[in-house]
Amino acid sequence: MPMPRTLADWLTLLEGLNMAHIELGLERMQRVAGRLGLLSLPSYVITVGGTNGKGSTCALLESMLMAGGMTVGVYSSPHLLDYRERVRINGDFADEQAFCDAFAAVEEARGDTALTYFEFGTLAALWLFRAKCPDVVLLEVGLGGRLDATNVVDSDQAVITTIALDHTDWLGSDRDVIGYEKAGILRAGKPAVCGDPNPPASIAEQARQKGTPMAFSGRDFHWQQQGDSWSFTMAGKQFDGLPVPGLPLMNAATALAVLAASPFRLSVDAIATGLRQASLAGRLTELSPGLWLDVAHNPESATYLASRLAEGQGSIHAVVGMLKDKDISATLAALTPLVSHWYPATLAGPRGADGSELSALLNHAAYFESVTAALTAALAARAEGERVVVFGSFFTVAEALAWHRTQQKEL
């Protein structure tokens, strides 16, 4: 069969390669990565795992390292509108032809080895990073850690952000078991950081067993907000007057701890610049005045979203669409005290929850057959000074972004 020529054709092929959307295990990845010479990279590799905050921590590290003059590659998932979002090199997406070349290399190397969509994409990203050879590569774990495709790489440093109950069908039903899976990215003798202020004991135990020197939030590093600035302390050094970023401060502190444990020494000016410039699409993104998007999809991330919304003014109209395998009730409950008007929506696809399910939990009669319909209604109903927030899933935010892009083109 001839190789696909366009990125769209490659993605169609990938979607049909293996019907298992999630298939944990590293044996197949190791086999193909070994053939491609991707089990280690020439760059300094930092693997970032955890339940919430992985993307924000990667974005903060990326921004600070680039402000310090370093070249940085980032692999993240899922994407919102464009598959190329998954691979950034110095802040730019890899181009379509580069992806096609990477996919072709993986396809040739895999032979008769079956790969999932995520595994194929991860190998392509590693191939691109080896070709471009940035100073630092940040790998965001997709699911878990121990058996995730990104864990095939022999990384130089590991990060665990927070541990919460999510993907329990795959990772376990309590924080200790989930912590064990997340700690699978730790390496013997390689530095690691945990940003969870109350981590499960399994993480420290895994660090001890593996011989991983690990810094913990609240024990080895500390941070405190002081109005419009904040301070960070680690290993006897204190930095005061740091600018508050637009991303969660807890993740900024984790990122600083990662830098402190790395071989890189950035100036205070570079750190401050990086903090100010850090951003991530879909995380507290204001598309237009009073229209906010956030990919919060579990109770922990929804609680953080609520805390940020509470800082603002004006009644809130909430558009929400969720996947049915999430803790929908607790996620909605985190925002219920703040929301004046709800617009529950059905998410398309086999994993999408029906809008009627959300409506029932909210004791709310009206629901919408799509995020677009819900968002249109919310924007029409809000009064001057009121806010609309769209949240609940990457798919929810992606649909809102696509709608907004269409509206902008029509203006």
Image (cartoon, rainbow, N blue to C red):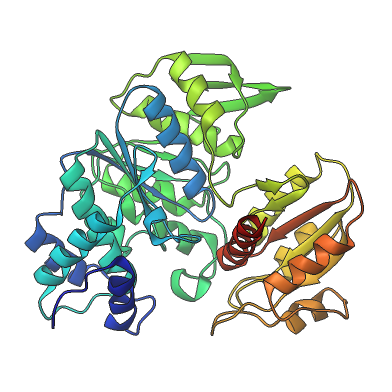
Q: Is residue 216 visible?
A: no
Q: In which quadrant will I find the N terminus?
A: bottom left
x and y percent of residue 63 in the render? 44, 32
Q: Does residue 115 lie above or below 293 as drawn?
A: below
Which residue occupies the foreground of this view, 263 or 127?
127
Report the residue at 27% width, 68% height from top: 6
**Residue visible at 23% across and 60% down in the picture:** 124
Q: Position of residue 110 (x, y in %)?
A: 13, 72
Residue 389, position as x, y percentages in the image: 74, 56
Residue 204 visible in image: yes
Q: Nearer the viewer, residue 96 or 344?
A: 96
In this image, 39 relative to 9: left or right? left
In x, y percent, where is residue 343? 80, 70
Residue occupying the far front of the picture: 411
Figure label count: 0
Q: Quadrant of residue 396?
A: bottom right
84 relative to 238 in the view: left or right:
left
Residue in the image at 24% along x and 75% along y: 115
Indicate the quadrant where residue 190 lies.
top left
Give the camera-side residue of 238 and 305: 305
Please tell me which residue is depicted at 48% across the width and 70% down the height of the picture. Answer: 172
Quarter of the image for residue 91 reads: top left
Asked if 222 appears above or below 7 in the picture, the reply is above
Q: Quadrant of the C terminus?
A: bottom right
